[in-house]
Image (cartoon, rainbow, N blue to C red):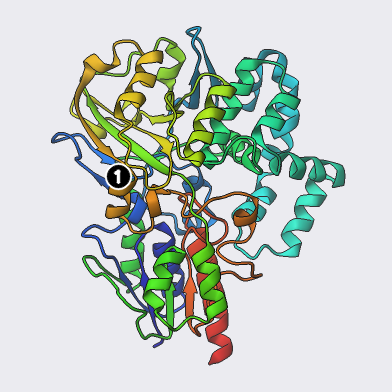
Amino acid sequence: MKRAVVIGSGPNGLAAAITLAQAGLQVEVHEASEELGGGLRSAELTLPGFIHDLCSAVHPLGLASPIFRALELDVEWVQPDAPAAHPLDDGTAVMLEHSLEATAVGLDRDDAAYRELVGPLVESWHEVERVVLGPHPVSPRALLRLGERLGPPGLARAVRAALSPARTLAEGRFAEERTRAWFAGHAAHSMLPLERRPSAGFGIALAVLGHVVGWPFPGGGSQALANALAARLRELGGEVRTSSPVDSLPRADLVLADVVPRELLRLAGERLPGRYARHLRDYRYGPGAFKVDWALDGPIPWRAAECRRAGTVHLGGSLDEISASEWGAWRGRPAGRPFVLLAQTSLFDPTRAPAGKHTAWAYCHVPNASADDMTERIETQVERFAPGFRDLVLARHTMGPIELEARNRNLVGGDVNAGAMDLGQLLFRPVRKLVPYRTPIEGVYLCSAATPPGGGVHGMCGYSAARVALRDLERRT
């Protein structure tokens, strides 16, 4: 029996391990931490009975993932009443609804413009999914099918929109300032300045996902998804070893590393050719995150009642304010009014907190490896749209970039996307190769979010890397 070793038990590592085990390999996963899951861990960070997600919390790509869907995992996906809300200073909010129709109607004068932007992509999601999520490398047939579905002019429009800066698209397409602000909040998930490509693509993708699969999260915490993946691996005979750090590349028929380029350099030592090693050293990491978890005495008292229907709330006011916040993270100056992404999972999942109590999770973008404490600035932003919020705080737990990296070495400087996702590094990560999963060392592959299709909880980096590795192994043997 051929033997495979997977380094790291995040969603990509576990997806890779399962794919290898399904092919009949003997698979073992090594995880440095005491708990498996990588960015999918949950814990009682504040008070007993309050369950918080250590890193990622809301997973639209998790439900959209082809590999997760095929595995039929034992996970209860919780769907909020609405995917996301964007409150404004006038006491109203702009909503991303499950229904494209309801969302467009809520955008008033921008109704038709929004339908034209996302409608064709929602209708063609099956083909869009194959191009966006893969498996990679994307086959010419998948591109051809998408082109046939959208039509050449429609495909050209979609590509231009997705590859454009968010500010350019928002100001060129939407007439209402409130719509521009709402779109900016979605695009800011990219952790890119809104004036850089392809930030608009992230905003479009998240809106489309809201209509196609929603923005759900696993019942009981993100750890439930990691546990379900590990259970499926064990059913196939695979093994997960926690508290098992790896300090050099192990010997096996296949080694798949769910690590960022910096970690691959450390593990490989002198075994990588000089040119490839230089490319890995030149790999660019994006801004970091500063995260706060709260145990609350009740639900957040949003001034805009619609926000209580949303699992995710974007706190940033206007397009200009969000833009300034994201530029601050890139230029080394944390914003005074940061753009805040907040998740209120306990409103829809009562297992997250004791009866009558609630949890909330929020983060903002800060310069990579920043030591600034953003707690006060984040809570001021919440209070701005939910007066009385601070009175509900029973306990809080904070993690800045340094603490995030200490818990997970893949979060370099607090970068939760495993590398800047600008145009160059989104299409070619971590190096400019047609098949970026292969390393120059025979039998060793990279399968982290530093490979296509990039960040997010979907497992497709691991799945795609494992497919390449299995084909190579078959040729060798």
Q: Answer with left or right where residue 154 lies relative to residue 460.
A: right
Which residue corresponds to mark 1? Answer: 54
Q: Amino acid at mark 1?
A: Leu
Q: Residue at x 75, y 57 (%)?
A: 143
Residue 17 visible somewhere in the drawing: no
Where residue 242 appears, as percent x and y from the top left, is 23, 65
Q: Residue at x 16, y 35 (%)?
A: 49
* Figure check: 435 above or below 425: below
Where residue 369 appears, as percent x and y from the top left, is 37, 47
Question: Residue 159 sits in which quadrant?
Answer: top right
Q: Answer with left or right where residue 373 lies relative to residue 67.
A: left
* Figure check: 240 above or below 255: above
Most extreme residue toward the left, as rendered? Answer: 48
Q: Residue at x 42, y 48 (%)?
A: 416
Residue nearer the viewer, 467 or 391: 391
Question: Residue 51 sits in which quadrant?
Answer: top left
Q: Answer with left or right where residue 208 lies relative to residue 158.
A: left
